[in-house]
Amino acid sequence: MKTLSAYVTAPEHFEFVEEELPELGEHDVLIKTEAVGLCHTDLPVFLCQQAFGISKHGYRETVKIGAGSKVGHEPVGTIAAVGSKVTKFKVGDHVTGFYSYSFTTYRVLPEDSILVKIPELQPGRDWRTCVVEPMGCVTNILYWMEQDPLEYVGVVGCGYMNLMVIAALRDRGLKEIVAIDVRDDKLELAKKFGATKVLNSLKTDIVEEVYQMTNGKFLDCVVEMSGSVKGLQSACSVIKFARKNGLPTEAFHGRGRIIITSVYTAEETFPKELGYEMVLRGPILDAAHPMTGVNVMENEERAVALFADGTIPMDQMISHTFQFRELEKAFQLLLHPTKDYVKGIVFFD
C-alpha cells in the first residue's frame, strides 16, 4: 500500500512523493490522516535551517538540515486497519496523537504510540479539530503551574496556546488572570476566553498596573509564549519577588514561576534589565515543553477529555483551514501571518 507524503525539497517549497508503506505488523495500526495542525516549530524545517535529530549517543538534539525533510506533528486520523493482536483500537476509531512526519495520507504505527481515541462529541463539533498535541502542551503547562499556590496569574502573548491556557484557568477561582500583549485585537480574544485584566505593553506601564491590582504582590505564575526575549523580559518584570520587595532583609515567601513554552529561535540581544530582574526577583524559569511531561500519554488523554467537555476549546481557535495540496500556502501564512490568523489546520479531504 502506498502513501503520499510531503517533503521540504528546498527552502519554502514542498513536493509530494508517493511512498510504499511498511507491512502492518500484528501490534500495528494503519491510520488514515484526516487533519494536521500547523505549528511554528516546523518553520525551521520549512526554511531548511534546523530540526530535532538524534545524537550519536541516542539523545535528541538540534541538527542542521538541508532539503528532503518531512514535517508535521499534530495529526488527527481514522483507524483504517489493525494488526491481528491489536486490542486498544478498532477499525473506524477516530484518533489524535503526537508523532512526527504526519503530513502524509497514511501512517503505520505501533498501537502503543502516543494515540488517543476521540470520544463522541456534542452535535456540531468537528472531531477533526481535536488536535491533541498542542492541547497536551496546555495540560502539561497546567500541571507545572499547579505545583505552587496560585492567586494571581498572567500570560504573555495571546496566541492560541495561551488563549487555551486562559480558557482552562477561567473557572479555577483565581483572583486575576492577566493577559499581556502588544495587539489590542489579541487582548480582546483573551477577554473572550476568560482573562480578567488585559494590558497592552506598548501603551501601559505593565509593572505599575500589576503592582496596583495585586497590592504589591505581583504575579504568582506567568506563562510566556511570545517567542521573544522581550516577552520574557515582560514576564520577569511582573513575576513576584522571592523575598518581599526583593530585599534581603525581608521574609522569603516563595519563588514565582515563569512557564516558558516558546521556542526562542530569533537572534536577539539579551537586555541587561532582564538579567537584573532575574537576580532581584529570583523566579523559577520552567521550560514546560511536552518532553517535560511526567507522563506524556496521561497529558494527551486529559487534553482530549478537556476538549470533549469544552474546557479547552481548540475548535474555537482555528481561524484558517487548508487542503493537503495547499501545504505550501499554509506554511507561507504561518511564516507571514495575517492580522486575523490564530491557528491553522490542514484537512486531507
Image (cartoon, rainbow, N blue to C red):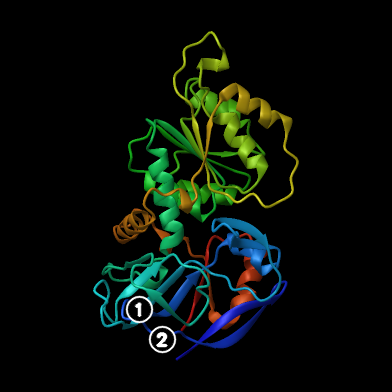
Label drawn at residue 211: none
The answer to whether residue 256 is above or below residue 52 is above
Q: Position of residue 152 (x, y in %)?
A: 44, 31
**In the rendered image, the vertical position of residue 251 relative to residue 163, given as above or below:** above
Residue shown at the point (60%, 72%) measured from the top left: 330
Label 2 is placed on what type of residue? Answer: Glu
Q: Position of residue 157 (x, y in %)?
A: 57, 46
Crowding at dot 2, Cα within 10 Å, few <14 / some 14-19 / many 20+, comes out as: few
Which numbered disc covers residue 23? 2
Q: Which residue is mark 1?
A: 29
Kindly state the secondary structure of the residue where label 2 is placed: loop
Q: Can residue 179 be seen at all in this image of the molecule?
A: yes
Q: Nearer the viewer, mark 2 or mark 1?
A: 2
Marks 2/1 in contact by CB < 8 Å: the verdict is no
- Classify mark 1: helix, strand or loop: strand
Q: Residue furthest top?
A: 249
